[in-house]
Amino acid sequence: MKTLIAIKEADCNWMRETLPDTHPLLAPLCNKPFVEYLIDFAILAGCREIRLLSDGPLSQIEEYCSNGSRWGIELTYSNLHPSDGEQELLRKNRKFCDTGRTIILSGYNFIDYDKTLDYRSLASIDSAGAIASCPGGSITLAGPPEPSLTDQPLPPIGLTPVDDLKSYCRIAMTTLETGSSRYVLPGYGGEPGCAIGRNVTISKTAQIHKPASIGNNVRILPGAVIGPSAIIGSNVIIDKGSTVKESIILDNTYIGEQLEIEGRIASKNTLIDPESGVTLAMQDPHLLAGINGGATALVLWRKIVHALAAALLLLLLSIPFAILYPLLRLRGKWQDVPSIPNAGLAESIASAFSLDRYPLLPGVLTGRLAIIGSRTHENRAANHAGTDCRPAVFSYAETEAWAATESDAAIVERYHALHSTPLGDIGMTIQALINRIHYRNPT
């Protein structure tokens, strides 16, 4: 038995508007791409050959699904015309459907099936035609019946159109609440009702209320409350004290401090009300923002740029450091150079050149520190536990004229850690050096 999956652009244009960079078949549903639910059903029905048809581009699907070997099937791709009906699809794919039974899954619909049941009896049903339908499409049998591999009757099959954000959100929440026993959902740890992906850091003071689904590479910071009924995508950060319930947080999204999200879809810097379709683009990136992908290449490039900057500073500051270090060390003022009240000439020069940070620069060459990131003082360590902030020689807070409080500094540092670029870090390092020239602590 074989399967044709036919998806027309007209049926899912609304999803393209919501996720313009993602093919509708890759839209996440409980952190699992939509297309995988269709593939899972075809496999449960005994199909080992599947062809995906569309009148739109399929390059993203081909890149993700490849030839289907990850599921133990043969997956191929072809085009269709927007006006093609089922008979025309069969005619155009007659070599694929030349013998035996074919299942046609048409439309952008969610199939309500149960992974514990046996759907192989679809092959032996005598009559062809639709076995399930909805306004958005159908599940249709074509071709002659095949010998049955099971004596079990056909289990019930439901079909629900995914035709707007409201239906998408409703299906996602229903799948979250009841789907762990019915569908193969992603998750590598946790307990019943709480699927947790890989590389997830959850603060000890954060709360997770079931049901919840958490993707890969997620950071949940102190005081955050997740759930009930929360779907957190991959590469997401939920900052301190924020609440997410009855909501979907899509991939690559940053939720800022003390933000409450209920009954919404969050995608990068945009909040969407699935009931009304109203969208709100947040202008303050400290509250809601996107997170850049491609982390592996970016981290390597950042380390190279930071190491070059540190090597240059080591070279330029070596002479002032060699001259002033013995004097200030002898006077016991070395570590407090920037904050010494009524500083003398030596202290002023050392502060202007940030010589108190000079001993930290070799750590950038070894990769232990960044040239700019989060401050490395001991009283900052607890605040950065479990975050993506990078211990560094200079802090992002120093580029904004020394944030007034520890909380302000933490916000600044987390924001720049998410949004800065390697070359931009060099400019920010220069700004931090300039700000330190003018900084004095009078107490």
Image: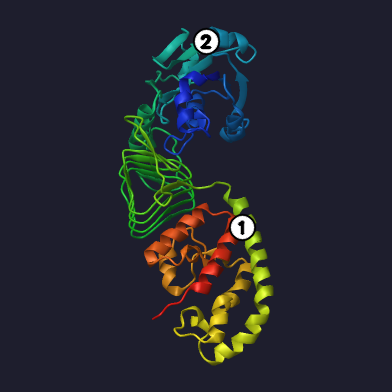
Q: Quadrant of the N terminus?
A: top right
Q: Which residue is mark 1?
A: 302
Closer-to-camera residue (146/213): 213
Classify mark 1: residues with Cα within 10 Å, few (<14), some (14-19) or many (20+).
Answer: some
**Residue at disc 2, secondary structure:** helix
Is residue 371 placed above or below 278 in the rendered structure? below
Of badges 2 and 1, the one in the foreground is: 1
Closer-to-camera residue (233/32): 233
Counting residues from the start of the chain, the first of labels 2 and 1 encountered is 2
Residue 208 in view in this figure:
yes
**On the rendered structure, is 361 left or right of 261?**
right
Residue 144 in view in this figure:
no
Q: Gap between marks 2 and 1, in whole Å?
A: 53 Å
Classify mark 2: residues with Cα within 10 Å, few (<14), some (14-19) or many (20+).
Answer: some
Q: Residue at x 51, y 89 (%)?
A: 332
Please state the horizontal and vertical placement of residue 382, each as a whole percent of the image.
41, 68
On residue 86, the disc is: 2
Please state the horizontal and vertical placement of residue 114, each as a whole percent of the image.
40, 28
**On the rendered structure, is 396 left or right of 360?**
left
Is residue 106 placed above or below 171 in the rendered structure? above
For residue 428, what is the image quadrant? bottom right
On residue 316, the disc is: none
Is residue 213 placed above or below 103 in the rendered structure? below
**Residue at disc 1, secondary structure:** helix
**On the rendered structure, is 71 left or right of 242?**
right
How many labels were placed on the picture?
Answer: 2
Please state the horizontal and vertical placement of residue 326, each as a whole percent of the image.
60, 89
Q: Mark 2 belongs to which amino acid?
A: Glu
Q: Mark 1 belongs to which amino acid?
A: Arg
Q: Residue at x 35, y 40 (%)?
A: 247
